[in-house]
Amino acid sequence: MAKKITKSQLETLEHQREQVKTELENLRKELRAEIEFDDVDDVASDLVERDKIQAMIITFERKLDDINHAIQQAEVMGYGICEMCGNTIDPERLEIFPETTLCINCKRQAERRGRMQQM
């Protein structure tokens, strides 16, 4: 049964989306500054810093994708409905991860499959 996304749930996701976009913008500016202000004497620490910033950018890009996906899924299937099994996602899980579209059991299964494919 589809559960329509409430205004406050949508606002939470949209607020999160804006925060992530802002953070991504700041990180990209920081990365550009790191590249432009290259100090030849400190190349090793510059590379480490760039790697950290790039890793954070990738993490935030994935989070932004998850938020956008959650909003789309909420419009199609309803908010708080697992896209794999169709069961209701635990409200406590949604409280912590409002962008989730998988119940805890399906998330575990997906992670197991991901680990198996990496082997």
Image: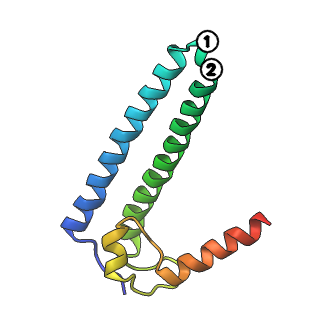
1 or 82: nearer the viewer:
82
Q: Position of residue 11 (x, y in %)?
A: 22, 59
Give the amino acid type for the residue marked by disc 2 in the picture: Val
Report the residue at 53% width, 84% height from top: 105
Does 95 appear above or below 104?
A: above
Quarter of the figure that contains the C terminus:
bottom right
Q: Is residue 87 left or right of residue 94?
A: right
Give the amino acid type for the residue marked by disc 1 in the picture: Val
Q: Is residue 3 left or right of residue 72?
A: left
Quarter of the figure that contains the N terminus:
bottom left
Disc ID at residue 2: none
107 or 77: nearer the viewer:
107
Report the residue at 40% width, 62% height from top: 72
Task: Determine which quarter of the picture holds residue 94.
Answer: bottom left
Cβ atoms under marks 2 and 1 closer than 8 Å: yes
| Residue at the disc numbered 1 | 40
Does 66 appear above or below 38?
A: below
Q: Position of residue 82 (x, y in %)?
A: 46, 79
| Residue at the disc numbered 2 | 43
Q: Residues within 10 Å of mark 2 (few under 14, many from 20)?
A: few
Report the residue at 25% width, 61% height from top: 12
- Label 1: state its secondary structure: helix
Task: Determine which quarter of the picture holds residue 25.
Answer: top left
